[in-house]
Amino acid sequence: MLHSILNRDFGDEQKDEDSITLELCSRVANLLGKEKAVFLPSGTMCNEIAINIHTNPGDEIICESSSHIINFETGGPAAISSVMIHAINGKNGIFEAEQLSAAIRKPSRYAPISSLVCVEQTSNMAGGTIWELDKLNAVAIEAKKYNLNTHMDGARLLNACVKTGVNAETYSKNFDSVWLDFSKGLGAPVGAVLAGSEEFINKSWRIKQRLGGAMRQSGVLAAMCLYALDNNISRLSNDHEVASFLESEIEKLETVEQILPVETNIVIFDLSDETISAPKLVQKMEEQGFRIGAFGERRIRIVTHLDVDMDSATKLVAALKIYL
Ligand SMILES: *Cc1c(COP(=O)(O)O)cnc(C)c1O
């Protein structure tokens, strides 16, 4: 990946003069079946730009309660776009079209206007679960019935594609905007690409500039993202295999109260009250060279990626067994 940036010509991205960034955007637009795409420093910026364009101040957007937009973007929708959020409690991050229609505000002189629905493919904090195509389409069709815009946080969309064999364009078809993160499972150091209609992307450029996301020789980053597109997609199945192995071992542990169904590369489980706390377990693992995450006192999250192989997963299980 590092070699992919050597001996290349770079230009000014914000003037559309960086050919490598342009190539990346056109490849991703194509992959997602959209007219155009824009390179951004992060997935968070993709979400926040999309929300800004799809809404007006005072509107309400609809997201699942565990979503990244609600929990990890520092209140960005309120701060940047002056919108409210209606949270739907889904099952493992997935909600039904009926839940969406119940959440959409009826036209009223008093209520905020529902203008956007967001979905996460795959769900992050709900355990990497995959939106089935039928459910995704039903939600998008319901949204369009009420003139809502549709946005897909596709940070791990390609994990879903590799797992199910459904292509990215098919998953994204009924969504006005969708993006991929290159700094997650795809293994690039920096970057995300947001795609949509030509009009949407032209508007995105203004918000990108406003938020300080316009870059110069971004080809240094884009070259590595292109490398990831060429080399790191099909190998996501290894991450799924390692996660599935972890699931099968962790669910056997007596002090594990529940484990969320593992569908892709995220393993989430809760520790029973009789055992060590989650932050303490994380600290103990860190001392032995394993990085896992704690969410609250009892919940642990483990993510597999291209630097984690079956051997390290086996060692992690052995280390966990000392405490659980
Ligand atoms: C990581 C992540 C983001 C944010 O992406 P960054 O590139 O870290 O800003 C957004 N949504 C989901 C589901 C994520 O997992």
Image: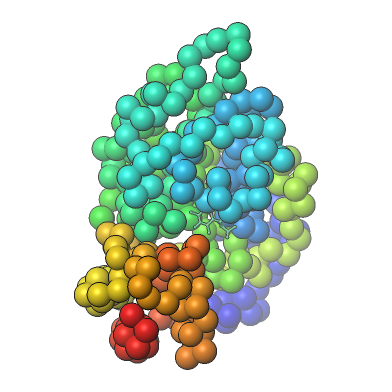
Image side of residue 63 versus residue 133, left or right: right
Work out whether residue 122 or residue 322 is closer to the camera in this orientation and state it.
Answer: 322
Picture coordinates of residue 23 (x, y %)?
56, 57
Picture coordinates of residue 162 (x, y %)?
31, 60
Picture coordinates of residue 159 (x, y %)?
36, 60
Image side of residue 218 versus residue 258, left or right: right
Instruction: Give the quadrant of residue 248.
Output: bottom left
Instruction: Give the quadrant of residue 111.
Output: top right
The residue shown at (37%, 68%) is 273
Quadrant in which the C terminus is drawn: bottom left
Work out whether residue 37 or residue 100 is closer to the camera in this orientation and state it.
Answer: 100
Colour theme = rainbow
Residue 309 in the image: above or below residue 278? below
The residue shown at (45%, 73%) is 277
Work out whether residue 123 or residue 23 is closer to the camera in this orientation and state it.
Answer: 123
Residue 157 visible from this viewpoint: no
Quadrant field for ligand 1: bottom right
Picture coordinates of residue 47 (x, y %)?
58, 46
Q: Residue furthest front?
A: 274
